[in-house]
Amino acid sequence: MTEKDRTAAIFKALSHPLRLEVVRRLGHGEECACKIAQWFDSDRTTVSKHLAVLKDAGVLKDRKEGQWILYSVALCCVLDMIECIDSGQCGPIS
């Protein structure tokens, strides 16, 4: 996969509102899939598919702890980008 393809895959993974919100919230710390599903009042299957998209793109990472799979942000620069855009302080490049 080229660098351009990887970048495109990351932006594609972030293009869904639920996935974007997952990344925002995981910026505060890792969480299990069952808790993430509760955030959105969604079933675990739907949330698992979204988590897989984010993990496959390299945005999230996971680790197993007992029976739980905990997810966290793998690319801190994505959090910075989201924060910049959310703040409305991103201006044009001069």
Image (spheres, rainbow, N blue to C red):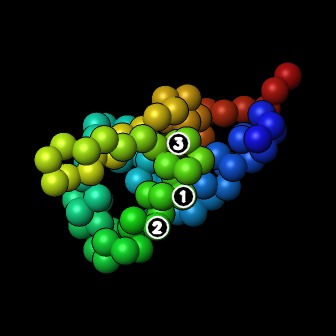
Q: Which residue is mark 2?
A: 49
Q: Earlier in the sequence, mark 2 or mark 3?
A: 2
Instruction: Give amino acid for label 3.
Output: Val
Quadrant of the drawing holding the C terminus = top right
Figure disc tally: 3
> Relative to 40, is 24 above or below?
above
Residues at circles 2 and 3 in contact by the CB criterion of under 8 Å: no
Identify the mark at residue 53; answer none if there is no mark: 1
Disc 2 element? helix
Identify the mark at residue 83; answer none if there is no mark: none
Q: Which residue is mark 3?
A: 59
Would residue 42 be found to the left or right of residue 18 on screen?
left
- Between residue 79 and residue 58, name the one nearer to us: 58
Is there any visible trace of residue 90 in the rendered image? Answer: yes
Residues at circles 1 and 2 in contact by the CB criterion of under 8 Å: yes
Instruction: Give amino acid for label 2.
Output: Lys
Quadrant of the drawing holding the N terminus = top right
Instruction: Give amino acid for label 1.
Output: Val
Q: Residue at x 71, y 41 (%)?
A: 6
Return the x and y of residue 32 as percentages of the image width and height. Answer: 24, 53
Q: Residue furthest top?
A: 94
Return the x and y of residue 54 as percentages of the image width and height. Answer: 52, 52
Please tell me how crowded label 3 is: few (under 14), some (14-19), or many (20+) other residues with Cα within 10 Å: many
Q: Residue furthest right?
A: 94
Q: CA distance from mark 3 to mark 1?
A: 9 Å
Is there any visible trace of residue 26 in the rendered image? Answer: no
Q: Earlier in the sequence, mark 3 or mark 1?
A: 1
Disc 3 element? loop
Please tell me how crowded label 2 is: few (under 14), some (14-19), or many (20+) other residues with Cα within 10 Å: few
